[in-house]
Amino acid sequence: MDRLAQANRNRQAIEELLAVDDVLTDAMLSRVGLDGTRFPGLTLSVQPMRKSSWTVDVTFRAASESRLRDAPISSLSHAAGTAAMRWQLAASAEQWTIDRGGRFHRPDAVMKDGEELIAMEYDAGYDRRTIRRKVRQFEPYSRLVWATPSAIRSARMKADYPHVEVITVDYWSAQT
């Protein structure tokens, strides 16, 4: 395959991913052998867990410059964390719907699995009260999958809410 055909296939694959996930990172793309440098990018120092001293440089990619320029860092990190959930769960584009306007009352995404509607929530540092409220709010869904960027936080969440499926996701490192 010539270089132009490969570049076109790379571009098309990333466009398809961004149509579902909204924001991705170079690290996520590199894990699946894709190069996002032809798409708008923004490199920021982020704290994967809010209120932690640990920071990492992350290059975010989106379909448009304005999506990156107009969003707060926490919004980009949250979108990338939600995308990392989909990738880790191997949910197809057809199964996955993100909800950018949900905030407190709706999950970050909903995954359809057969007849089940599964609430998806990404948590990079909610306080205990917010967690309780969200877990209660999402009870009407068949299941709830809760993701965090910290194995310690995930373990605590599993202990506090054994009925919730909890996963740890990573959107910032090329190797997982």
Image: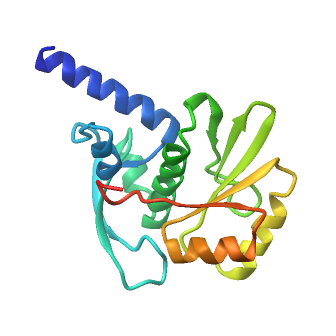
Q: Quadrant of residue 134?
A: bottom right
Q: Quadrant of residue 35?
A: top left
Point out residue 60 in the picture as x, y percentages from the top left corner.
34, 53
Point out residue 34 in the picture as x, y percentages from the top left corner.
27, 36
Residue at left offset 78%, top offset 63%: 163
Does residue 80 appear to the left or right of 116 in the view shown?
Answer: left
Does residue 30 appear to the left or right of 84 in the view shown?
Answer: left
- In the displayed structure, 28 sits above or below 4; it is below
Which quadrant: the N terminus?
top left
175 or 78: which is nearer to us? 175
Residue at left offset 43%, top offset 70%: 48
- In the displayed structure, 18 sits above or below 122; it is above
Residue at left offset 56%, top offset 45%: 89
Point out residue 40 in the picture as x, y percentages from the top left corner.
29, 44
Residue at left offset 44%, top offset 58%: 76
Tally of numbered tags: 0
Point out residue 82 in the picture as x, y percentages from the top left corner.
54, 53
